[in-house]
Amino acid sequence: LKDFGRIYGQYNNFAHVSVDAIAKLIVQSEQGELNGPSLLPVYNEELAIPFYGMHVFFIVCTAGQIHSVFEEIFGCGINEEEAKWLFLAVEILKKADIIKAVPA
């Protein structure tokens, strides 16, 4: 993931809602200094796209690992159609600037 090492701590803080500023991004109800959960879903594109992208990226990586294990154990891994879907997922992640190709 692009800059993943640098932002891992920020993702961790978000997951545990340990930083007040982050918590405020996911709540909609505020009264003075009190924040509460929204009764309606809150969509924050700035947060949703990288988190969803990270989720998809981990699925693609897991599929790659499963392919390697199955190749070694059973002599066959993912099929051609599955490989096309994984390739498409990677291309979408690149287009969304979630991941980037590392120069050889």
Image (spheres, rainbow, N blue to C red):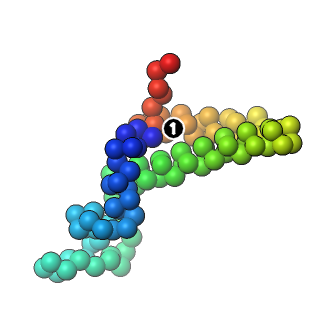
Which residue is depicted at the point 23% across and 77% down?
Answer: 35
User: Is 94 left, or right, of 27 in this rendering?
Assistant: right
Nearest the viewer among 26 and 71 is 71
Q: Residue at x 55, y 48 (%)?
A: 58
Q: Residue at x 39, y 43 (%)?
A: 5
Residue located farthest toward the left when viewing the structure as drawn: 32
Q: Position of residue 45 (x, y in %)?
A: 35, 53
Identify which amino acid the numbered label 1 is placed on. Answer: Ile
Screen quadrant of the N terminus = top left
Q: Quadrant of residue 90?
A: top right
Q: State the residue in front, 23 or 93.
A: 23
* x and y percentages locating residue 75 in the rendered image: 86, 37
Quarter occupied by residue 81 = top right
Residue identifier under label 1? 92
Horizontal side of residue 2 vs 83, given as left or right:
left
Residue 13 falls in which quadrant of the image?
bottom left
Q: Position of residue 99 (x, y in %)?
A: 45, 37
Number of other residues with Cα within 10 Å of mark 1, as a class: few under 14, some 14 to 19, many 20 or more: some
Instruction: Indicate left or right for 93 with 82 as reference.
Output: left
Compared with 56, 78 (above or below) is above
Q: How far across and how far down the image is residue 37, in percent? A: 32, 77
Q: Is residue 63 left or right of residue 104?
A: right
Report if residue 102 is visible in the image: yes
Q: Residue furthest top?
A: 104
- At 32% from the left edge and 76% from the top edge, which residue is drawn? 38
From what the image shows, is residue 103 above or below residue 2?
above
Q: Is residue 43 visible?
A: no
Element carrying mark 1: helix
Judge whether 59 appears above or below 16 on screen. above
